[in-house]
Amino acid sequence: MTGFDAPCVSTVYLDKPIKGHTLMQTIARANRVYDDEKENGLIVDYGNVYQQLEKAYAIYGEGQKGSGGEKGNEEKPFEQLEAMASEVKNAIVEVTDMLSELDFDLKTLIEASAMSKIAAINNGINAICRNEETKAKFEIAARNVFRKYKALFPEKQAKQFVREYNAIDALYSKLNAKVKSADVTEVITRLQSVVNESISIVGAKETEGVYIDLSKFNIQALQEAFAKIPRKNELVYDLNKAVENKLEQMLKENPLRLEFYERYQEIVEEYNNGKSEIELKRSFDKLTQFYQELTVEEKRAFQENLDQPTLSIFDLLVKGKDLTKDENETVKKVAQETLEILQREKLNILNWKESREIRSSVKTTIYDKLLWLPEEKYTDEDVSLRSILVYQHVYSNMGFNQLRG
């Protein structure tokens, strides 16, 4: 007898006869549940121990048969399998009904020909991606099907559910294969490719359909293209995720961009609450306009003649201050020199954050450099407070790995 335990399944191979309680212990171990990820195990019988199982169940099962007690509710393995099959069926019905509410019939995928299966899967994904809530509900229901089905497999009762299982698995796999870090430009390019077979990115002239100049990010052209595509849910969902990823990157670069995050949360809340196609279009419009604002914010570093890391320190220093042009230039110089000396002398040390001495030296360097801020606008208290803010930002977002990258 050999065995293997894992969170999702336990398999025990029976290659020789086992008697009585030893057999029951073996089965109990294989069937030991694990949270909601594992409902039972798999027994592979090479030793023809079924008769021993019957005897052991009579002795150790409910009802105490064989020990003089009254015969209880003795359930045969076949009846257990039928009950498990009923659970699989109910789980599949739950997924089917859910998809039906989203205007997708699972039968269209089950019965699709080889040539039309990809289109059927894409239509299913489009329905599931109505919003975060519908996606999450499908994933939970699909995993329930997988658990129930794998608990029943490879018994013959599982064969009747093979097609439904494969269809749900195809949708689930495609859904989770979607690129998590989708780029907004890639999503918009995909939008264009749906409308036209050829894509013109810069300096295009309109000949047929709607062309999008990604360098200018023409919102009106995007809206016209969006109106023409057949699977709007999936594209808005992908655009939402791409904007979210972009915003997370920008927030890491500069913590003062939190106002963008708060506005994005409002857009997401409306998106998740929306049910109609009109609301879906409104979400698309808001996401594209919001991304355009993010693009403008990204270009601000170029306009200020600063790189992104220096811009983040500059923003911490000027927040809440009404500065003249000359004072503004002085603060820029302080931000640049502060970061330069930190990168040259402190932040290029591996694991500098683990050294109390180096951390203290970083704090001192920041404070000393900030003493050069315009005296007319920055009091001693201002310098101390902003030194702490700059240090916290540097500690959280800058280090050896970032500099090497």
Image (tube, rainbow, N blue to C red):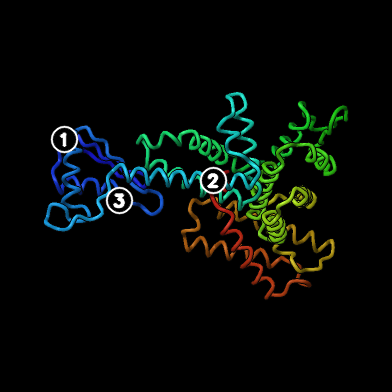
User: Alpha carbon of mark 1 to alpha carbon of mark 3: how far?
Assistant: 22 Å
**Looking at the picture, how far across and down is residue 188, in whole percent?**
74, 39
Which residue is under mark 2?
Answer: 95
**Looking at the picture, how far across and down is residue 333, in whole percent?**
74, 57
Q: Sequence order check: which comes first, mark 2 or mark 3? A: 3
Q: Of the numbered discs in the image, which one, if any, rests on residue 4? A: none
Q: Amino acid at mark 3?
A: Arg
Nearer to us in this view, 130 or 154 = 154
Nearer to us in this view, 292 or 230 = 230
Compared with residue 152, is residue 63 higher up or lower down, i.e. above or below? Answer: below
Which residue is under mark 1?
Answer: 16
> Closer to the observer: label 2 or label 3?
2
Does dot 1 land on a helix, a strand or a loop? Answer: loop
Considering the image in quadrants, where does the N terminus appear? top left
> Closer to the observer: label 2 or label 1?
2
| In this rendering, position of residue 195 left or right of residue 353 | right
Instruction: Give the residue displayed 75% in from the left and 52% down from the top.
Output: 279
Q: Sequence order check: which comes first, mark 1 or mark 3? A: 1
> Badge 3: how crowded within 10 Å, few (<14), some, or many (20+)?
some
Q: Residue furthest top?
A: 115
Question: What is the quadrant of residue 265 in the picture?
Answer: bottom right
**Looking at the picture, how far across and down is residue 170, in whole percent?**
53, 35
Q: Is residue 285 visible?
A: yes
Q: Amino acid at mark 1?
A: Lys
Q: Sequence order check: which comes first, mark 2 or mark 1? A: 1
Q: Amino acid at mark 2?
A: Val
Compared with residue 209, is residue 70 higher up or lower down, i.e. above or below? Answer: below
Which residue is under mark 3?
Answer: 32
User: Alpha carbon of mark 2 to alpha carbon of mark 3: how far?
Assistant: 27 Å
